[in-house]
Image: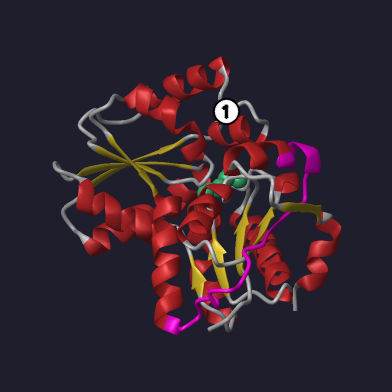
Amino acid sequence: MSNKPIGLLDSGIGGLTVLKAAQAMLPDESFVYIGDSARNPYGDRTSAEIIQYTNELASFLVSQDIKMLIIACNTATALTLKQLQKDLDIPVLGVISAGSTEAIRQTQNGHIGVLATQSTVDSNYYAQTISQASPNMKISSLACPDFVQLVESNQYESVYAATVVEKTLQKLPDQSIDTLILGCTHFPLLAGFIQKAVGPSVHLIDSGALTAVNIGSRLDALGLRTGSCNRQTITLYTTGNVSLFNKIATKWMQSTDMKIKSIPIERLSSYVK
Ligand code: DGL
């Protein structure tokens, strides 16, 4: 048993899709989250930058005495999960395996689509994870570079966002996709527009929400669940604009019972050992 918080990191707002599912599923657990909105988007950055920034966020969370680290970002999962699992002495979970497993379970025709950042698509991590588990799947990936900014700028419910989503998804390589992974944790905020663009017959997979199930089973397996009289606390840190982060986070999480704090990027490197 451990009453320590669970840490989550993302390049910005996106990981809140994982946090929202996790806090609903694990109402006694406490969470500490960091979103690097000041350096967002990660998806267009070099691998070296993504690795450095993710290490900084992970080190910051470790300094907050977390019992488990969730890389609530597909881009960072693809580039850092294996290394962080080796480097840290707490359990580390990413978001890619849960969505991949569920997509394999859901597809009827064996054709899975993946919407992700450019970096995640280039890493080929989804294709490798799916093919290892089920070698006969056809996988079609599409980078959606404009989607993240629609969320970070709080425009994700706008008519402009609907237009961008519709136009981008016209580039999906094959119409026979029956299961589509939202392979970026920012994308569930655009799920309504994405579903409209691809049609009701395509099954959308929110890998972030599915990760929440994995968090619970890993806590149980390791005996790390919190005591039942623990009061859930949620603390959010952002490297970016606190009032914008607050506005999006409060609306998305449908909660005002969260502490939102600023952490300047200049301070983050001091946490790396
Ligand atoms: N939310 C992130 C992901 O799941 C990345 C967004 C970005 O910063 O490009 O990939």
Residue 34 within the magenta-colored segment of the rendering: no
In the shown orientation, is residue 270 left or right of residue 132? Answer: right
Query: Residue 122 placed where, x, y %?
Result: 45, 49
Task: Name which quarter of the figure residue 255 lies in.
Answer: top right
> Where 146 falls versus 3 (above or below)?
above
Query: Residue 265 placed where, x, y %?
Result: 81, 56
Closest to the observer, 131 or 231: 231
In the shown orientation, is residue 179 left or right of residue 207? Answer: left
**Which stretch did the figure color magenta?**
222-246
Query: Residue 193 placed where, x, y %?
Result: 44, 25
Q: Callout 1: helix, strand or loop? A: loop
Residue at x 36% of width, y 59% of height = 98
Q: Is mark 1 within 8 Å of ligand 1?
A: no
Q: Mark 1 points at which residue?
A: 156
> Where 181 falls versus 104 (above or below)?
above
Task: Name which quarter of the figure residue 90 lies in.
Answer: bottom right
Residue at x 22% of width, y 36% of height = 178
Query: Residue 63 placed where, x, y %?
Result: 74, 75
In the shown orientation, is residue 211 left or right of residue 31? Answer: left
In the picture, the quarter occupied by the C terminus is bottom right
